[in-house]
Image (tube, rainbow, N blue to C red):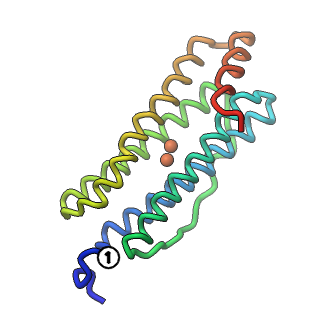
Amino acid sequence: METHSDPGGLLDKEIQEAVNEQIRGELYSAYMYLGMSAHFAEQNFDGFARWMRHQAQEELQHAMRLYGYLLERGGHVDLRAVEAPPTKLGKPLEVFEAALAHEKKITTMIHAIYDLARKKKDYATEAHLQWFVTEQVEEEGNAGLAVEQLQLAGDDTSALLMLDHRLGQRSKG
Ligand SMILES: [Fe+2]
Ligand SMILES: [Fe+2]
């Protein structure tokens, strides 16, 4: 079936490919945050563990937003292998720095799909991605703030425990 035969339905192939890759990216993010959560739980940083677990759940919701969007547009959901996240994780600062670096990568991916949607005049995809553009500002902001606070705490155990407590307030889940 030709993709242009149904103006409101079937989605451009390149867009579909990019959105499917983004679903993989969001699922990988969830997997990565879950690994970070376990790492912190094992080290008795319960607050950091909760922050990461909350983040993992958000990433699953991001994947589901894109999944729902593809289906709504008559696209094809093509689930791909999600690689294992790094298993050797270091100190809290290093872990949050890795999270921040990952979020920046995700932002670049989102912007690339946004550019593609614009180029192809796919206004619906552009509009849907607007939410993600805004969300990424918040994601980078949250991780960036944690990095800055951890830099201030340094190796001071009581400062670290205070931060652990504070970041754990993010969600009660
Ligand atoms: Fe995400
Ligand atoms: Fe994220």
Q: How many labels does the image show?
A: 1
Q: Is mark 1 on a helix, strand or loop?
A: loop
Disc 1 packing (10 Å; few <14; some 14–19; many ≥20) = some
Residue 55 coordinates in the image, percent (x, y) = 60, 41
Q: Which residue is drawn at 63% across and 55% down?
A: 84
Quarter of the picture containing the C terminus is top right
Determine the image quadrant of residue 73: bottom left
Q: Where is residue 28 in the image (x, y as percent from the top left)?
A: 56, 54
- Left or right: 46 as drawn, with respect to 89: right
Residue found farthest to the bottom: 1
The N terminus is located in which quarter? Answer: bottom left
Name the residue: 60% across, 25% down.
93
- Residue 156 higher or lower than 40, as above or below: above
Residue type, mark 1 in image: Gly
Q: Which residue is drawn at 74% across and 38% down?
A: 39
Whether label 1 lies within 8 Å of ligand 1 gets the answer: no
**Residue that label 1 marks:** 9
Answer with left or right where residue 107 lies relative to residue 47: left
- Residue 14 figure quarter: bottom left
Up-down: is 110 above or below 38? below
Placement of 20 over or under 101, stated as above or below: below
Residue 103: x and y, percent?
Answer: 47, 40
Q: In this view, does 33 lie to the left or right of 76?
A: right
- Nearest to the observer: residue 124 or residue 21: 124
Q: Which residue is drawn at 31% across and 48% down?
A: 111
